[in-house]
Amino acid sequence: MWTRQHRQRNTGRLIVPAISAVFLSYFGFHAYHGEYGIYSKYQLETRVAELEGRLGEIRAQRIELERRVQLLHDGTLEKDMLDEQARKALNLSHEDEITIMRPSRQYN
């Protein structure tokens, strides 16, 4: 008859909780820092706010350009606008006027 006494080891009890802790920490890390995580959400919200501000500026520029184009239509042609555009196109001015030369804007 064999009498072997086995001593109980505590390592067997710690394997499942350790594996669970590793999985939870992995998924928790990616839930916060991942591509669709909480931190990315905050970054996207700040980017949206920046772009909405820029959109407001661009809309204001567009409204101003539409107003200027409206002044050039056939039925509503204003003499001041026509004079301004002709002087720009021909690069001319009157003798009694002071001309200020500015560098032209170059758009990319």
Image (tube, rainbow, N blue to C red):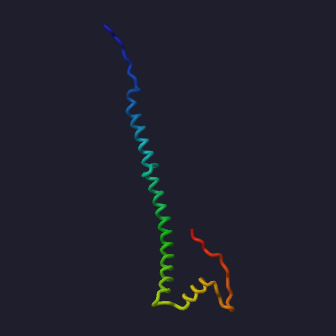
The image position of residue 63, as x and y in percent, is 48, 78
The image position of residue 42, as x and y in percent, is 46, 57
Check the image and name the residue furthest to the front. 90
Q: Nearer the viewer, residue 9 or 53?
A: 53
Residue visible at 44% across and 56% down in the picture: 41
- In the rendered image, the vertical position of residue 26 relative to residue 74, given as above or below: above
The image position of residue 103, as x and y in percent, is 65, 75
Check the image and name the residue furthest to the left. 1
The quarter of the picture where residue 82 lies is: bottom right
The quarter of the picture where residue 83 lies is: bottom right
Q: Nearer the viewer, residue 10 or 90?
A: 90
The image position of residue 64, as x and y in percent, is 50, 79
Q: Nearer the viewer, residue 19 or 89?
A: 89
Which of the image's four quarters has the N terminus? top left
Q: Nearer the viewer, residue 7 or 97?
A: 97
Residue visible at 48% across and 64% down in the picture: 49
Residue visible at 56% across and 90% down in the picture: 80
